[in-house]
Image: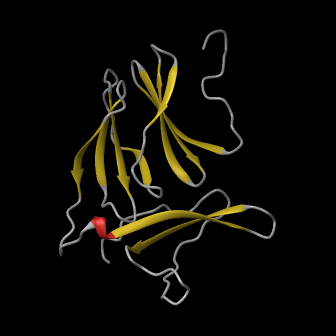
Amino acid sequence: MRNGACFVAHRSDVLIERVELFKNFAVVSEKREALSRLRIFDFGSGEWSEIAFPEPVYAASGGGNPEYDTGLFRYRYQSFITPPSVFECDMTTGRATMLKQDEVLGGYDPAQYCSERLWATARDGTRVPLSIVYRKGFQRDGMGALFLTAYGSYGYGTAASFPARA
């Protein structure tokens, strides 16, 4: 990154939402394929890495990083299955540690559910993301009930969120 070189190059399939700068790192929050991505740049090595998330459909964003001279990046994460959580990622190793997770009352067991990312093709050829969640063992034979919610257009979609009141 010398002599006016570009730090984050334009990619037509990516929306850059935010850049957070630290003494030795930068974190770029971006949207790609209708999902939030958190990419870390190490100024020392010149290498990029991406924070890995355990589910195919989720929402993630930076979450309160006031210290400039730190190697830890705090972020928020949730999905249709995982309640709102706060993690801290060691930007050197990529190891994430959960610091907090909202409590779910009533015996909720996330292991009983699955989520998937599917794609539909619109008449104009545009790929449209579909995010689904269901209880394990559900027969996808067209006979079960469906509750459809959300909408997305013009680069904005409804993020995956945990149904706290369900």
What's the image's color scheme? secondary structure
Query: Quadrant of residue 109 in the image?
Result: bottom left
Residue 51: horizontal and vertical position, in percent?
Answer: 43, 38
Identify the residue at image location x=69%, y=37%: 11
Establish if 152 lies above or below 59. below
Query: Measuring 49% from the left and 64% from the top, which residue is drawn there?
Result: 116
24 relative to 29 in the view: left or right:
left
Q: Nearer the viewer, residue 9 or 137?
A: 137
**Quadrant (top left, top right, bottom left, bottom right) of the C terminus:** bottom left
At x 79%, y 63%, the residue is: 125
Q: Position of residue 60 (x, y in %)?
A: 42, 49
In-image side of 150 versus 166 (left or right): right
Q: In this view, does 97 lie to the left or right of 9?
A: left
Quadrant assignment, res 4: top right
Q: In which quarter of the image is the N terminus?
A: top right
Q: Is residue 34 above or below residue 163?
A: above
Front residue of 47 and 100? 47
